[in-house]
Image: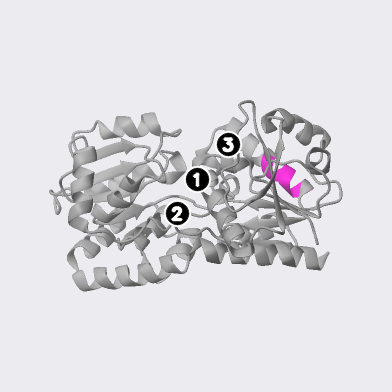
Amino acid sequence: MARIYLDATPVLHGERAVRRNTTNLYRHLLLESGGEEYVFPYFTGRSGGRLPLEGGAKTIPIHWPGRLLQPLWLRLGWPCIEDLAGHCDLYYSPDLIFPPGRRARVLSTVRGVVYYEIPQYFSVKALRWMLTMHAYALRHSTHWLAVSESTRLVLLERDQLDPDRVFVVSHGVDPMFRPLDRAKARAQVQARFGVQRPYLLYVGVVAPHKNINGLLRMFVHLRHTRPDLYLVLVGPNGTATEEIDAALASPLLATRVRRLGAVATDDPILAALYNASEALVHLSHYEGWCAPPLEAMACGIPVVLADVPSLRELGGEAASYAPVNEPEQAASAVTRLLEDSLYREAKIRIGQRVAAAHSWARAAQKFASVLRRILEDG
């Protein structure tokens, strides 16, 4: 039987979205397969740590901080995964920086190509690091996993990769995101955050490429027609935090926009925030994949999205769309959802079907088929 290594380091130490997605994918993979085919090596880091994977997962703790090894991987292509964890036939990395393989086939994950699509929104230092990671993954991967078809197409065009070696496995929706009693959800949100009026919702990091300034301009267009409406921003601080906080001090926004900060992805209040909202509005300049629109649709909440390829791919006919730099059109899309009940209900029904098609069980099945195909192709 082939020996397949699935790097589980992000389950312990990954950025919050990567940690959640990797954990969900691996847990469902174990449920689907029983785990007999898979081994999960992971870098324990300085503080150690026990891998939280159920189902008798076979694990290999590597007692090195991965960050200390990154310069060696980047400069020398060493130490290899075989040096650290023993022989394997296929090694999967959820990230772009990983121990290279000596003879093993290597499948790495590209979660987006923001550095290709909108480099102007990043500092020179950040952009250089992202491009360095991407170039490293190109050199040391034999196969690539994209999180969306739109990301795959950019990779094929920009990097001239073999189409037979680039696969797509999109993320699933956590089961906690489902329709709740709206009155109870509103009561929970009011008790926790003090938000009482109807509100539009944004969920995501406060970063330039998320176009929160565009979201605020859209909201200003609604101030006369919907004076009862709030805007609620949920998500961790990012590189646009100071800019957005300054914008929120404007008299037009100060009393009608609430920034709640980060909410844990497994906190039930997040599902309540979706359920209590009137709509999710996400006007990002670029996404590789974006969970909040699917989470909102799973909760029975309509969404207005930027008209960019990955969000079109994700939302399909369920979403309403507006050009990224046209806040007035986005405001019109929101107004129609709020005032046309038949249109709203139709979008909600389609959205629930779209969300249901993105289960983690289905993602795990597709991922397992990708691993088998790589091994069969040799």
Quadrant assignment for the N terminus: bottom right
Q: Which labelled disc corresponds to residue 183?
A: none
Q: Secondary structure at mark 2?
A: helix
Residue 100, position as x, y percentages in the image: 78, 43
Residue position marked by numbered label 2 in the rendering: 291
Quadrant assignment for the C terminus: bottom right
- What kind of residue is marked 1? Ala
Residue 25, position as x, y percentages in the image: 57, 55
Q: How many badges with numbers are in the image?
A: 3
Residue 362 showing in the rendered view: yes
Task: Using residue 232 as the reference point, say whether residue 198 is left or right of it.
Answer: left
- What kind of residue is marked 3? His
Q: Nearer the viewer, mark 3 or mark 1?
A: 3
Q: Secondary structure at mark 1?
A: helix
Q: Residue furthest right?
A: 103
Q: Residue at x 53, y 39 (%)?
A: 15
Q: Is residue 341 above or below residue 181?
A: below
Residue 293, position as x, y percentages in the image: 39, 57
Q: Earlier in the sequence, mark 2 or mark 3?
A: 3
Task: Using residue 195 as the reference point, say whether residue 134 is left or right of it.
Answer: right
Spatial CA span between label 2 and label 3: 20 Å
Check whether the beta carbons of the residues at disc 2 and disc 1 lie within 8 A of each other. yes
Task: Using residue 115 as the reference point, say whether residue 228 is left or right of it.
Answer: left
**19 or 63: nearer the eye?**
63
Q: Residue at x 34, y 34 (%)?
A: 244
Q: Which labelled disc corresponds to residue 17?
A: 1
**101 or 37: nearer the eye?**
37
Residue position marked by numbered label 3 in the rendering: 13
Q: Residue at x 25, y 30 (%)?
A: 249
